[in-house]
Image (tube, helix red, strand yellow):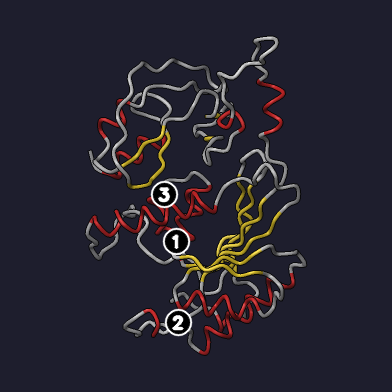
Amino acid sequence: MSLRRALALAACGLAGGSVLLSAVVVGKQPARGGEGEPHQPGSAVPATSASASTSAAPPGLLLLPPATGWIEKPAGSGGYWDSNWDRREPLALINHKKKNEETGERELTSRLDHYKAKATRHIFLIRHSQYNVDGQADKDRTLTPLGREQAELTGQRLASLGVKFDQIIHSSMTRATETTEIISKHLPGVKKISTDMLREGAPIEPDPPVSHWKPEAVYYEDGARIEAAFRNFIHRADTKQEEDSHEIYVCHANVIRYIVCRALQFPPEGWLRLSLNNGSITHLVIRPNGRVALRALGDTGFMPPDKITRT
């Protein structure tokens, strides 16, 4: 079975029940036994066997079966939503075997509140500005004069939103670092953090495929890193977070497109169907209950038409 087919089956919950895909390239997960149970439309889908999918999945692909009650299927809907997509659903954080020492009863309800998120996270994904594509090494791929203008416009736009940004996390690549430095001038006092996890790469083989061929090893290495970045940065708020947060991530088109697909639980191999301008703003909202909304995708409406590029 092709990788694309395995992904499609996993995402749709076919091949033996409700199996959702986490497209991280690691060792193959062993198959589990058991048979799937039928379910009624509009009800939660029970946990089922992942053996049919994992046995057919290509080597290096990890399929994560959800726990009971974490898959929701709204009445009249053909799609599924994995409430535990970030592994922070309260039920997933509780030791269900633990009992009250005095009564011997499980205090599930009272303990659930302790593990529920309270705040909303606003994630602003910024694509770097136009850069010198002829540079041989990363250090030579600096922003062009137009790229620096774009970064100024993006910084002005973010400052005009009137929100208190908590931090700016950016790719360690030169074009993202330079974009961050210009943006941060408009947001004084906001701390900056550099990370290699957000560097550009090929997250997963796109569907439909691109005309230029890439060896599987490229997706295997880049995909694992970019998936790790998604898991590390994109999730509901920590239970200790009391107030809503606003965070900026300055990185690259491939990374942002993959993150959007994963966050919305769209097929991740569709990332190349999206297009992002230089200096654009993508706004994701993650609610305390784990629901995700896309407020803006690749917004450059704040730039004059002659300043917009997609290099």
Q: Earlier in the sequence, mark 2 or mark 3?
A: 2
SS at circle 3: helix
Q: Label 2 vs label 1: CA separation?
A: 20 Å
Q: 14 above or below 127?
A: above
The x and y percentages for residue 57 are 27, 36
Q: Quadrant of the C terminus?
A: bottom left
- Kindly check if marks 2 and 1 are in contact, taking CB atoms under 8 A apart as contact: no
The x and y percentages for residue 306 are 56, 84
The x and y percentages for residue 94 are 59, 28
Closer to us: mark 3 or mark 1?
1
The residue where tag 1 is placed is 197
The residue where tag 2 is placed is 131
Left or right relative to 115: residue 61: left
Give 189 or 291, whichever is nearer the viewer.
Answer: 189
Residue ID at (63%, 72%) = 301
SS at circle 2: loop
Which amino acid type is marked by label 3?
A: Pro
Residue 290: quadrant of the picture: top right
Which amino acid type is marked by label 2?
A: Tyr
Closer to us: mark 2 or mark 1?
1
The residue where tag 3 is placed is 268
Which amino acid type is marked by label 1?
A: Met
Q: Earlier in the sequence, mark 3 or mark 1?
A: 1
Q: Label 2 vs label 3: CA separation?
A: 27 Å
The x and y percentages for residue 189 are 71, 73
Q: List the single residue furthest toward the bottom.
A: 145
Residue ID at (45%, 15%) = 38
